[in-house]
Amino acid sequence: MEALRTFLNHSEGLSKNDMVFLIDHLEERRIKKGTVLFEQGAVVTTIFFVSTGILHHFNYTEKGEKKTIDLHDAPCFCTDLESFTEGKLSKDSCVALTDATIYVLTKEKYDALVNTNVKWSNFVKRVIEKTLVNILEQLKTIANKTIEERYLELVKTKPDIVQNTSVGILASYLGTSRETLHRIRKKHLFA
Amino acid sequence: MEALRTFLNHSEGLSKNDMVFLIDHLEERRIKKGTVLFEQGAVVTTIFFVSTGILHHFNYTEKGEKKTIDLHDAPCFCTDLESFTEGKLSKDSCVALTDATIYVLTKEKYDALVNTNVKWSNFVKRVIEKTLVNILEQLKTIANKTIEERYLELVKTKPDIVQNTSVGILASYLGTSRETLHRIRKKHLFA
DNA sequence: TTGTTAGTGTGTCATTTGACACAGTGGTTT
DNA sequence: AAACCACTGTGTCAAATGACACACTAACAA
């Protein structure tokens, strides 16, 4: 809960009352490693706030490979935006990679919240705007850096992800093979 | 102008009155190939709607290479979101790759619009949401497909981009070298 | 204890790629 | 016409990568 409070303060400076109001709409859930948050082929009707732990967001490509789309590490929001906002079937699945604490906002409560007041509509707009800016930044990083540079950056900026994720998943996240990531790691055996 | 009308109808179903109101806020501009829309190091204070033509959105990497971020082909919106919403200096530049017709919305008018009415705030929210969904989709495509598959897809879905863009820029857009794209093209010399 | 399973560490090899080099082409300027 | 320019087309070569194969380890279940 504290994680969420801090996260929101950092990003959006809501008033204390707003914060309490928002938190009233959320349900805390402690989940075990392996718990499925949402699944390919189903409609996603919730937004998650990850307070502790890591979620594995992935899908299966046309070629049948399991492909990591994102590793959601606390603190962050997580949902399938297309499925959530447009009611489409999700193409992705999301599974807890570690034990985790999450806060759940259902679509009914989300809609109620957004329609209550312009303030909340603008709040969501800003959150989505920031997410978009981040994703665009990520896209540029992918375009401009090598796998090795991105791996080393990940070690620095998100050590928890590196420590809690298998070579295979991490490789798929970085867009390379298990073997290649292994070679990169071998080069940097001093930390 | 018709392009914008159609585009908005397609994506957001505004009423006729809303549309007229929006269009009143826009200034049409016909620009020549090579015209600079915004530039690295300056604050971007406008949103463009590209009605005809193609814009080249790029930046220079730490290594000094010119790197294509996006090719905005009509009809579409174009801005540097981070610079526009947060007033930061842009890291990117944007130049017309062909002669083009664009509609310009200044930040003052944008702010006025968004603050006029919840309707417009929600309109912008939906546009940004859709943009985010598209970018996420694009990110998945990059992750799951080879350069060759992406090139062939581009030929099908955006032939105007392929026809009006040099091999070098297209290669940089696809994330490969000029030579490699050339090899791919040579493989498919029948269309 | 013994299997079973998931993931790791490592080697080989064919393929793909990027880097470099340079000739050719088409358009523009002087 | 001559010079210049941006871009194309192409060859060579070293390096990086993915695919495959297999032994090894740790965790967990029967």
Image (cartoon, coloured by chain):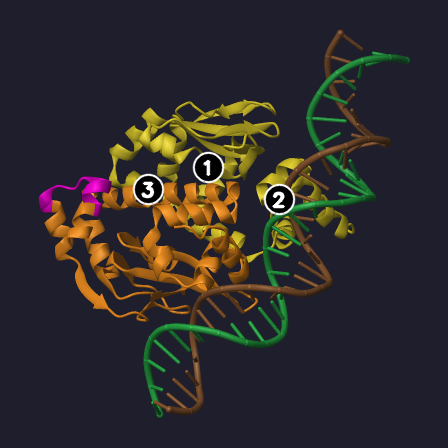
Chain colours: A orange, B yellow, C brown, D green
Q: In whole angstroms, how far apart are the C-alphas of marks 1 and 2? A: 26 Å
Q: Are marks 3 and 2 in contact (CB under 8 Å)?
A: no
Estimate how packed mark 3 is, as few (under 14), some (14 to 19) or many (20 or more) residues with alpha carbons within 10 Å: some
What residue is shown with label 2?
A: B176
Residue ID at (57%, 56%) = B145
**Could you tell me the amino acid type at mark 3?**
Lys
Circle 1 sits in a helix, a strand or a loop, which is it? strand
Q: In whole angstroms, how far apart are the C-alphas of marks 1 and 3? A: 18 Å
Q: In whole angstroms, how far apart are the C-alphas of marks 3 and 2? A: 29 Å
What residue is shown with label 1?
A: B77
A59 drawn magenta? no
Residue B187: which disc? none
Asked if one can make out residue B59 in the rendered structure from this viewpoint, the answer is: yes
The quarter holding residue D18 reads bottom right
Q: Earlier in the sequence, mark 1 or mark 2?
A: 1
The residues colored magenta run A7-17
- The location of residue B151, given as percent across then percent down, is 64, 49
Which corner quadrant holds the N terminus of chain A?
bottom left
Dot in front, 1 or 3:
3
Q: Please count the marks in the image.
A: 3
Look at the picture and state if A54 lies above or below C18: below
A124 or B108: nearer the eye?
A124
- The location of residue C14, given as percent across then percent down, is 73, 62
**Could you tell me the amino acid type at mark 2?**
Thr
Asked if one can make out residue B129 in the rendered structure from this viewpoint, the answer is: no
